[in-house]
Image (cartoon, helix red, strand yellow):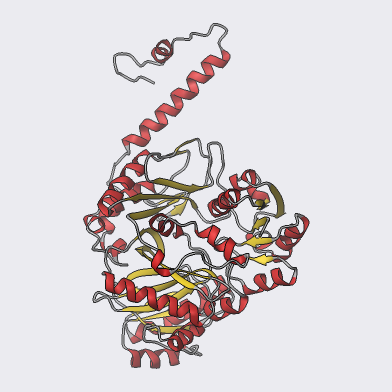
Amino acid sequence: MIKKVLIANRGEIAVRVMRSCYEMGIRTVAVFSEADRSSRHVMYADEAECIGPASSSDSYLCIDNIIAAAKKHKADAIHPGYGFLSENPAFARRCAKEGIIFIGPSPETMERMGDKIQARRTMIEAGVPVVPGTCEMLPSAEEAVRVCSEIGYPVMIKASMGGGGKGMRVARTADEVPLMYEAARSEAISSFGDGTVYIEKFVESPHHIEIQILGDKHGNVVHLFDRECSVQRRHQKIVEESPSPFIDDSTRKAMGEAAVAAARHVGYVGAGTIEFLVDGRQNFYFLEMNTRLQVEHPVTEEVCGMDLVKQQIRIASGEALSFRQEDIRQRGHAIECRICAEDADNGFRPSPGLIKQLIEPQGNGVRIDSYIYEGYEIPVHYDPMVGKLIVHASRRDYAIERMRRALYEYKITGLTTNMGYLRRIIDVPQFKNGCYDTSFVEANADRLAARKGYHNDAEDMALIAAYLDYLMNYEENTSDTRDDSALSRWRSFGLQKGVLRI
């Protein structure tokens, strides 16, 4: 059994992995950049090691430094989290070379499924439906125009490597193809170091639905049902839920079976995700495979009652899955909102800064995966996501009510977050009715925009309360004659007859 795990990541996912390790009696090692010395994941771990300066390329993406830290601290295994090196086959190979267990699939599987062109070919071999398109790289804009005329418009020009919505452009006419081809290639080169692109038929207003899978080293593969991920902005997910309110039971069953067939075909080991596009008639098409843990994995954990990180660790240790497909059930409904330090009303501009007050929601069915705390300064160098708010309830309408309440309770002052934007998403009738697809954000842009002159009274009151608390503590700690009467202290700051004067 694995006894010590180094987490080659930062932020909320590092803390989340450590929590599961702690429950399993496994010691943890945190790695951190110089900008992350005061991050919660560093304080939570049993041991910690600085691996370089703030730049990701010199720290969290530096394989040599991470391996050196693992060997120094005698870690049995490395968990990569998501992002950074989580889908890097060279990193997985280096771990194997150094005798360190990589908690994830083999490098060969990563290579086969990480290249989207190769992944399309593989899924066709496995009998999984794919979106009509090319299975070869496009050598020129002229060739792209010719292929597009055969497929029919609109089309999606996509980078073969990477993810996160980068290197993707839609072309609706032949005139747009050369420009979009060059734009997709340029972004792919800058983001992934590889300008290879291919073409798929663009499915208008589809649902983005993914299936979680688990595979062990003994040939057992199961799926853990579906997640609806169609609330997206520029191909970046914002809100996810499970189960999908759109697909019916027969489609859900067929998608699960297709995902298992895909995983079996590539000999998949570990936790992974098969992503599909589903059109309005519930025809589904393979989109891509993520050979790692997804950001949105908590909604699956909530409805299936399973800890995916623990499953990853057990699989990496060589254990067989302790359950069969028929043992897994979806129970109730879960929704996740990504909490980001960004100004949604100002072009989603990142908004790093010092957290002055933090009030996290509590109560039945509320879960927070986060790494922030009062007094922590969010660095400017990394992704703006500071945490995830997850709720679970027996029915979808109850889960929506719970999410609305939790977002109301959640207070972060000192910087701008997207929580106001998330509240507006939850209140859009199209979302509440479950009748939305990937065009949701664009179709509801006016509804999602903050009203001019709008102020959130709850957030204003939180700021006032924080200021009063500061003044009261200041008075108590500096006054020679302390008054133990809480009422008199409130009066001293002008709270008389229910009127606040500051």
The location of residue 315, given as percent across then percent down, is 58, 66
Asked where in the image residue 69 lies, by quadrant, the reply is bottom right
Residue at x 72% of width, y 51% of height: 49
Asked where in the image residue 275 lies, by quadrant, the reply is bottom left
The location of residue 474, given as percent across then percent down, is 53, 19
35 left or right, relative to 439: right
- Establish if 88 lies above or below 179: above
The location of residue 243, given as percent across then percent down, is 33, 62
Q: Is residue 449 visible?
A: no
423 left or right, relative to 169: left
Asked where in the image residue 494 lies, by quadrant, the reply is top left
Residue at x 42% of width, y 75% of height: 259
Residue at x 41% of width, y 59% of height: 300
- Establish if 262 lies above or below 382: below
| Residue in the foreground of this view, choosing between 332 and 69 | 332
| Residue in the foreground of this view, choosing between 462 and 452 | 462
| Image quarter in which the C terminus is found | top left
The location of residue 389, given as percent across then percent down, is 42, 49
